Image (tube, rainbow, N blue to C red):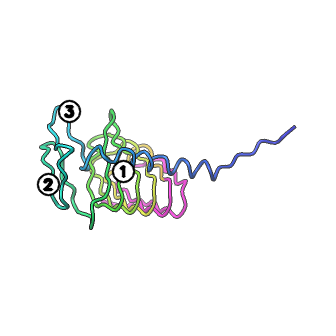
Amino acid sequence: MRARTTDYSSRLAAAAWAPAVAALLLAGCSSTANPPGPGTPTQSPTTPMSPGATPTSPGAAPPTGTSPSPSPTASVQIGNTLNYGSMGTTATLDCANGKSLNVAGSNNTLTVTGTCASVTVGGTDNKITFDKVDSRLTVLGLNNTITYKDGEPRVDNVGTGNTVNKKGS
């Protein structure tokens, strides 16, 4: 009888990089942290935005900071889940009251307002602060620093060098 072995390190690496790859594939979908609502006019995809420019979508919140050079950013809401991917940006995201959030990318500094039902973070060297995480906080990847102010989520820290802390408001 042959013993079955499982290579968890390759599965972990695949799970950590899958959201980042998906975010890069969707990079052209949005240039703002908060996607426009249904029926909201958006900026023409053929009109490039210069660094520091304000989006023209009335429903979109402008990023709170700029990066030295434009970086690919994807922000797509599917149902009640916000999917955000970027590299080297500073932004504020809003979970409102109970959205789920998936974050992928590297070297981002994010502030997440509202109450997130569940959160998954993949990538490297992200610094993310949450107002509140309710049920689950999963951190994949390397050297991410995650802070949440409120909530009692189940924390799954399955990456390497990640720091997850709860700090009072």
Where disc 3 sits, the SS reads loop
Where disc 1 sits, the SS reads strand
What kind of residue is marked 2? Thr
| Region rendered in magenta | 140-169
In the rendered structure, which disc, 2 or 1, sits on the residue that comes first in sequence?
2
Mark 3 or 2, closer to the camera: 2
Going 84% across and 40% down the picture, which residue do you hit?
2
Going 45% across and 48% down the picture, which residue do you hit?
21
Q: Alpha-carbon neighbours of circle 1 within 10 Å: few (<14), some, or many (≥20)?
A: many
What residue does disc 2 label?
54
Q: Position of residue 83 (x, y in %)?
A: 36, 44
What residue does disc 1 label?
85
Viewer-closest of 18 and 5: 18
Is 155 positioned to the left or the right of 62 in the image? right
Residue that protrudes farthest toward the bottom in the picture: 68
Viewer-closest of 136 and 128: 128
| Residues at marks 2 and 1 touching, judged by CB atoms closer than 8 Å | no
Task: Name the image quarter holding residue 136.
Answer: top left
Which dot marks residue 65? none
Which dot marks residue 38? 3
Marks 1 and 3 sit apart, C-alpha to C-alpha, by 21 Å
